Image (cartoon, coloured by chain):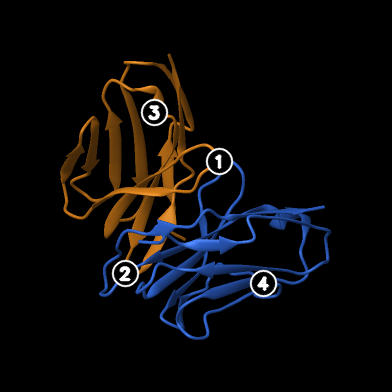
Chain colours: A blue, B orange
Amino acid sequence: EAGVAQSPRYKIIEKRQSVAFWCNPISGHATLYWYQQILGQGPKLLIQFQNNGVVDDSQLPKDRFSAERLKGVDSTLKIQPAKLEDSAVYLCASSSRGDSSYNEQFFGPGTRLTVL
Amino acid sequence: GQQVMQIPQYQHVQEGEDFTTYCNSSTTLSNIQWYKQRPGGHPVFLIQLVKSGEVKKQKRLTFQFGEAKKNSSLHITATQTTDVGTYFCAGIYGNKLVFGAGTILRVKS
């Protein structure tokens, strides 16, 4: 079974530029998550999708971050414009959550973003 | 908002010694999950605890969920160099999942 795919693996941009990350979850997984992990900290949930609907985006900085999962499969996360404090690893995860309880999350390798 | 506190932040042990990390929440959790992240890697699911007072074992790893469902622990018996990494708990509050800051484990051979 193929795992969660993410691209790019690394990205370096200057502040105020835009950047986009792509995630393809495990086939059949209805739930997709985007996390931000700053060095030395635990992953922080940015947005959670159930199929193509948003379940939770309470911690997404909506003035600069946006995410979509149009066909309920792959997803993109965009930052526009980037700030220095956005430097982090952006992790995508998916799970086969089918009811009200949480299932195991499978994480992708992440995209390491450096904002200069 | 909901927060899970993890202690210690960092532990350096001699190979063969035991290791324990603790996770605490000020409010009752629905479930709790544990993940391991190797240096440079991504989090990998270890286990989920659901019931009050639950204890689960995976070889040398023992996971416990408190009676009040506000705390949890992960204990590793006789650490090996392959155990190095950061161990995260992730507390589930209804439909929200919140990660702790993690405990970094280093094992000296």
Q: Which residue is mark 1?
A: B40
Dot 3: what SS? helix
- CA separation, marks 1 and 2? 26 Å
- CA separation, marks 3 and 1? 14 Å
Tag 3 and tag 1, C-beta contact below 8 Å: no
- Using the image, name the chain to which the residue with label 3 belongs: B
Q: Which residue is mark 2?
A: A96
Q: Which residue is mark 4?
A: A78
Dot 2: what SS? loop
- CA separation, marks 2 and 3? 29 Å
Residue under the point 35% across and 22% down: B80
Q: Earlier in the sequence, mark 3 or mark 1?
A: 1
Specify few, some or many for label 2: CA neighbours under 10 Å numbering under 14, 14-19, or 20 or more. some
Specify few, some or many for label 3: CA neighbours under 10 Å numbering under 14, 14-19, or 20 or more. few
- Front residue of B51/A53: it is A53
Dot 4: what SS? strand
Return the x and y of residue A63 as percentages of the image width and height: 70, 75
- Using the image, name the chain to which the residue with label 2 belongs: A
